[in-house]
Amino acid sequence: MKRPNLDFNKPCNIHFIGIGGISMSGLAKLLVSKGFRVSGSDGKPSELTKELEDLGCVIHYPQAASNISDDLDMVVYTAAIHEDNPELMEARKKVAHVIPRADLLGSVMANYPTAINIAGTHGKTTTSSMISEITMGAGLDPTISLGGILDSIGGNFRIGHSDVFVCEACEYTNSFLSFAPTINVILNVQEDHLDFFKDLADIRHSFKKFVELLPEDGALVINSDIEDIAYFTKDAACKKVITVGSNPDCSDYSATEITYNSVGCPSYTLLKKGVPSGRIQLSVPGLHNVYNSLAAIAVGDLLSVSMEQMCASLLNYKGTKRRFEYKGMLEPNHATVIDDYAHHPAEIEATLKGAKNYPHNRLIVIFQPHTYTRTKAFLKDFAKALSHADLVILADIYAARETDTLGISSKTLQEEILALGASCEYFDSFEKIESYVRKIAMNNDLLITMGAGNVVEVGEHLV
């Protein structure tokens, strides 16, 4: 179905099924600020729904068919709402436009002359946050939609008052193909979400369609290290294609003379078309963040932000929640506890390589695999990536949206890790993991809780 038009100059009546979600509530607040009449429903009241009610939104608890009034112009629902939901079923009978959240986000985005979408298998949240810091630091007053929590905006959504929209664009279920970009950033294209995509070729096809969304006067910023990037660029309507990557011979933006400070944060000399163009210092660790920052700088240049301002904004960026986030010290063992969202083998490897530059004695990773399909698809890759740690401690797989029909478990992953000669333990509860860690942690150990599930709770309990 074609994405409906949504004109900020012609506010209408919109109802959100599942309005209490962090992303849905952000969009609802934005539309209220533009004069739309917003209603919604959720399972129970929360701080987010209370904020919306204070803004004048009518919110119903729980969801019911009777919540769908006759005067609604549009109904929006989240991926968590199933087709047999009574409210959704009633909306399909009575309302002209019943759309998923991604379609609404695209309709909102179409009202912004500068709409920056950041996509990739990994690095999206960090790069989107870097671009957010750059645009805010330059006084561009952007509207921002992120997939993580950024302290400087107090959450994952910011309502700006300019023509600039910064959006983290997720490829899962092809959500990003509903968007209306003018600048697209592609950080990497690798296998993931294989419960939706058939294979890597299918994923690449979706990213190619994402590029094709750009208008002729739009711009594409793409990692030149991606295999056969011509596949993505050769049919692009946009005239501007800007490359960032590790090889200065084939990248418009690259880095050289990379060094690390005492906590593993890199600094580097920026190369623009091979010419030294200033020294960049980051406040987030890891080589991967050098390349994330190159993409952010390329976007900053497109927006005519000064290099001085970009340097200051990147130095000011301390990371988002759950991205190499310092949680505290485990006492009396005096071990440092970090939390990281990495749940793909490439992300894990990048994080653990970055951690090598962080002062520590042993590197201990407490890993919670995320979904059975991902664990099965990348079993050997997970084992190889995790083997960079001195000790791996595995929790049970976080099922998320799945049920175990694949015969895969964390014990299977443990066997693969042990076969590589690495040290690995498995425990069937967080309580057992915490007890074990308290026994074996030593002074100057670096403990990283890792995964996209609720493994963060382990580190929080330990500190």
Image (cartoon, rainbow, N blue to C red):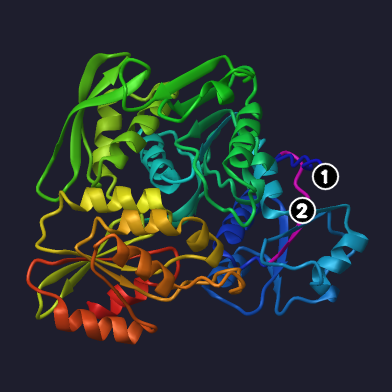
Label 2–label 1 contact, CB within 8 A = yes
Image quarter for residue 427?
Answer: bottom left
> Per the image, is 391 magenta?
no
Which residue is the extreme one toward the front? 419
Q: Quadrant of the C terminus?
A: bottom left
Q: Which residue is mark 2?
A: 99
Q: Secondary structure at mark 2?
A: strand
Looking at the image, residue 218 sits to the left or right of residue 91; the answer is left
Between 398 and 336, the one lying in front of the other is 398
Q: Which residue is mark 1?
A: 1
> Per the image, is 11 magenta?
yes
At 60% across and 65% down in the image, what residue appears?
Answer: 52
Between 2 and 122, the one lying in front of the other is 122
Please provide percent x and percent y for residue 117.
53, 37
| Residue bounds of the magenta highlight | 9-17
Badge 1, how many Cα within 10 Å: few under 14, some, many 20+?
A: few
159 vs 65: above or below: above
At 37% across and 17% down in the image, what residue appears?
Answer: 250
- Is residue 336 visible in the rendered image? The answer is yes
Please provide percent x and percent y for residue 123.
41, 45
At 11% across and 60% down in the image, what residue appears?
Answer: 360
